[in-house]
Image (cartoon, rainbow, N blue to C red):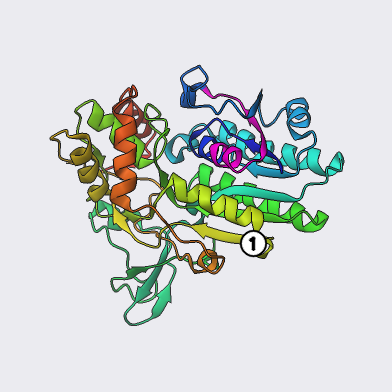
Amino acid sequence: MRVLVTGGAGFIGSHLVDALVRDGHAVRVLDSFDPQVHGGRAPDYLNPAAEYVEGDVRDRDALRRSLRDIEVVFHEAAVVGVGQSMYEIERYVSVNVLGTATLLDVIVNDRLPLKKLVVASSMSIYGEGQYACPSCGPVTPPLRPLEQLKAREWEMRCPRCSRPARPQPTAEAKTLSPTSVYAVSKRDQEELCLCVGRSYGIPTTALRYFNVYGPRQALSNPYTGVCAIFSARIKNRHRPLLFEDGGQTRDFIAVQDIVQANLLVMRDARADFEVLNVGTGHPVSIAQIGRLLAQLYGVPVEPELTRKYRAGDIRHCYADISKLQALDFRPSVSLEEGLRALAAWGRGVEAEDRVEKAAKELESRGLTRG
């Protein structure tokens, strides 16, 4: 197959490119080589068997060059960062939403005969995850009230009776409630692709990635995933910073399993026009991630409890992956194995710790409190 990967020089996209090349596909990459991610130069891990087009996903001419003779598109291109999106609002909406709209506009108006479109969505669009109340049953609470956070009562309460609520696996049917500009833009990417795909008969799948980690993450980008942020802190012998009490949980999935899911839905028509969670189905606390990474890097630091909280932060969210499992998806990389691979790679790359600067930026804008 002739395949285009937008954002194919990035963390997830480059692993996907490697797998596609390995499987014998002809692969083209469109990437802007964002300085915040790549430090102003092309990364040395780029697969030489792929073709590269340097350009912005909003650039119609670059898109036309990239889409020439293409049969399958994996749309991975996006600006990533929850906190930063709250004050670089125009950039996030422009790249993620306008970029996706421009991609779709070229596909449909140039009448390109695509056989498959796969868009990278995000668990962030759920907002809070799914919960269960012992009295009221399944509930989907909104964000915790400010008064609760000020009182440092971190756990979720039932929105009906105010009793403590237990986190449950979050299924694709949960009502979407994005709590950041980044999350809103990812929801828009997903919905634009599915809407246009259905209307024009282009088989389209949206994959809602949970917390992806692994080699090639941009360790010097303080707005990327928590595993990369913690890695930069630890490599510089600084303590990982924990908001709230560090007990908030997420679903951490290795990049190899994200690639597995993408290849699976490309081949399987049962995934057409579906929305699918991509996670492990197991919650892990942020504090546990900090401790595990410190051990694996061999740096004797303990996470630091800031006791602060951030605007829009959720408490718990982990994946119900039963829909993807029905397509024979099985996560293959354990947390310890995946973090070990991240640390092994991370030891050999430079990582500037910009976390405190980013934290001060958020605090100056009133986006962190406590």
Q: Farthest residue in the top direction?
A: 40
Quick check: 355 left or right of 305? right
Quick check: 228 left or right of 28? left
| Residue 234, quarter of the rendered image | top left
In front here: 188 or 197?
A: 197
109 up-or-down from 206: above or below: above
Q: Label 1: state its secondary structure.
A: helix
In front here: 41 or 130?
A: 41
Q: Was residue 29 drawn as part of the magenta stretch in this picture? A: yes
- The residue at 28%/62% (across/down) is 155
Quadrant in which the C terminus appears: top left
Residue 313: horizontal and vertical position, in percent? 38, 50
Q: Give the range drawn in magenta.
A: 17-34
Q: Was residue 26 drawn as part of the magenta stretch in this picture? A: yes
42 up-or-down from 301: above or below: above
* Residue 188 seen from this side: no
- The residue at 32%/68% (across/down) is 157
**Which residue is labeled 1 in the image?**
271
In front here: 276 or 131?
A: 276
Residue 31: horizontal and vertical position, in percent? 61, 28
Using a 10 Å C-alpha cutoff, classify the residue at mark 1 as few (fewer than 14 neighbours), some (14 to 19) or many (20 or more).
Answer: many
* Residue 311 seen from this side: yes
Residue 326: horizontal and vertical position, in percent? 54, 69
Q: Which amino acid does label 1 sit on?
A: Ala
Total marks in image: 1
Q: Farthest residue in the left direction?
A: 300
Quadrant in which the N terminus appears: top right
In front here: 5 or 221?
A: 5
Q: Farthest residue in the bottom direction?
A: 135
- The residue at 53%/64% (across/down) is 324
| Residue 220, quarter of the rendered image | top left
